[in-house]
Amino acid sequence: MKELTLYNWIIEHDPDATLKTYRMIESGCADTCLCASCKHYSKFRKNYLNEHATQILLKLGIDKTKEAEVYFTGDHKSFDGQFKVWFHFIGSIKSITDINHSSDSTYIKLTNTSMVSISELCEMPNPIFNRLKILQISFILLTDGSNMHI
């Protein structure tokens, strides 16, 4: 396990074990779902996951093409709104600083169009992660829909 300070979270994580686990997952949620939001996200994934988010995922050993969940809120014709995207990784939270603990919404701003949060899971994700201590990293990705149409 490696220790990493990621914004307000100090976590212990195992990027090698996470990467090994992701190699067993065939595809991400957006690539297998047939809804318009997932199809759109899958096609334009590289436009939504900015460099900050991509670097975080790389540090954690996460394959950015294999998200656990994606959902969109906003205008489904223009895709003006926000995507919420979740990934899982092997690790535990050692401590959290400077976050309002009375709220479940503990997102930290990465850029003007993205936020991140790390949390412990209440439900079991993909069965491949079974019996492993895992965390969820969540991104909110704000969109204006420009130049991103199916």
Image (tube, rainbow, N blue to C red):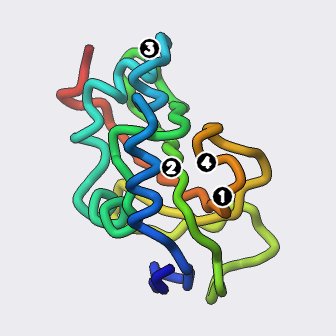
Residue 1 shows in the view: yes
Which amino acid type is marked by label 4? Phe
> What kind of element bears circle 4?
helix
Residue 58 lies in quadrant: bottom left
Q: Nearer the viewer, residue 44 or 26?
A: 26
Nearest the viewer among 7 and 4 is 4
Pointer 1: what residue?
132
On screen, residue 148 versus residue 40, left or right, reads left
Q: Is residue 63 left or right of residue 75?
A: left
Considering only order in the chain, which callout, 4 or 3, is on the residue closer to the N terminus? 3
**Of the residues shown, which amino acid type is indicated by label 1?**
Leu
Q: Residue furthest top?
A: 34
Is label 1 in contact with label 3 (beta carbons under 8 Å)?
Answer: no
Would you say 49 lies left or right of 31 here?
left
Instruction: Name the quarter where the C terminus is drawn.
Output: top left
Looking at the image, is mark 1 or mark 3 nearer the viewer? Answer: 1
* Distance (Cα) linking label 3 and label 2: 20 Å
Query: For the point 51% across and 31% down, which residue is it?
Result: 72
**Residue 49, percent from left and from top:** 30, 48
Q: How far apart are marks 1 and 3 (CA)?
A: 32 Å
Residue under numbered circle 3: 36
Q: Crowdedness of circle 1 by 10 Å Cα count: few (<14), some, many (20+)?
A: some
